[in-house]
Amino acid sequence: MAGESEVLQELQAREAIRDLVLRYCRAIDRKDYAALSALYHPDAIDDHGAMFKGLAGDFIAWLPEMLEAMEATVHSVSNHLIEISGDTAVGEVYCQAYHRYPGEEGMEELVVGGRYLDRYEQRQGEWRFSYRKIVADWNEIRPSRTDFMGPMFVGAATGADCLSDPSAAWFASDGGVSADH
C-alpha cells in the first residue's frame, strides 16, 4: 500500500499534467507561441500526422503560418487517462478542435474530434511534454454560421490573439479575486 507521501506526489503529478494540457489549449487558441514553447521539453517531438512531425520547437515555429488564416480556434479536452511511473507518464486526452477560416465561398469551420497521445516527463521538478501525437477519430467541414450581430452578443467581448484577448488583462489583474465583494 502506498504511503501518504507517495499518494500526495502522484496527485501533484496528475494535477501538474492536467494543467499542462489545459495550458496547451489556451496557448494554441490565443496564438501565444512563447507560452506554448514553455510546455515542451527542448528535445520534444510533436506529431500532427502529415501536416507536421518533428521537434516541437520546429512545430511552434511553423504554427504562425498555419494559424494565420484562422479567425478562431477552440481546443477543448475531456477524458484524460494518465499513467505515471516516477518522473515519466503517458496519457490519452480526448479533444475537439474547432477552426474557423475563410473558404472559397465564405467562412468555413473544421471541427476535429480525436485524441492526443502524450508522453510527459518531469525534469528539474517541472512536467512538460516530451512527445505529443494527434489521433483523428472524426471531422466535419461545414459553412460557418457564426453571427455576432444578435442581441445576445452586442457589446460582448470576443476572443483575440495573445495579449489582445480579454483573458490577458483578466489574469494580469487576478480577475478580481483579491477585490472585496
Image (cartoon, grey):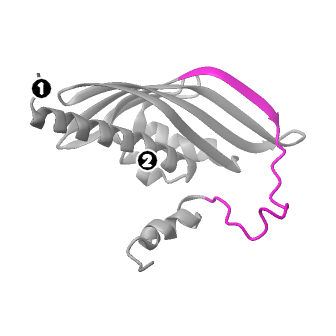
Few, some or many residues within 10 Å of mark 2 (<14, 14–19, 20+): some
- Which residue reaches farthest right? 105
The magenta stretch is 135-160
Q: Earlier in the sequence, mark 1 or mark 2?
A: 1
Q: Secondary structure at mark 1?
A: loop
**Residue 49, above or below 23:** above
**Where does the image place residue 47, in percent across and percent down from the top left?**
47, 26
For mark 1, does the 10 Å Cα neighbourhood hold few (<14), some (14 to 19), or many (20 or more) residues? few
Residue 141 figure quarter: top right
Q: How many marks?
A: 2
- In the rendered image, which quarter is residue 137 located in? top right
Closer mark to the observer between disc 1 and disc 2 = 1
Magenta stretch prevailing secondary structure: loop
Residue 97 or 63: which is nearer the viewer? 97
**Is 175 a magenta residue?**
no
**Residue 45: horizontal and vertical position, in percent?**
39, 29
Q: Specify whether 20 is left or right of 32.
A: left
| Marks 1/2: CA–CA distance | 30 Å
Q: Which mark is residue 2?
A: 1
Q: Could you say where residue 12 lies in the image, as x and y percent from the top left?
A: 24, 41
Q: Residue at x 42, y 52 (%)?
A: 35
Which quarter of the rendered picture does the C terminus lie within? bottom left
Image coordinates for residue 76, horizontal then vertical, percent: 56, 39
In the image, is residue 74 above or below residue 133? below
Left or right side of 1 for 115? right
The residue where tag 2 is placed is: 23
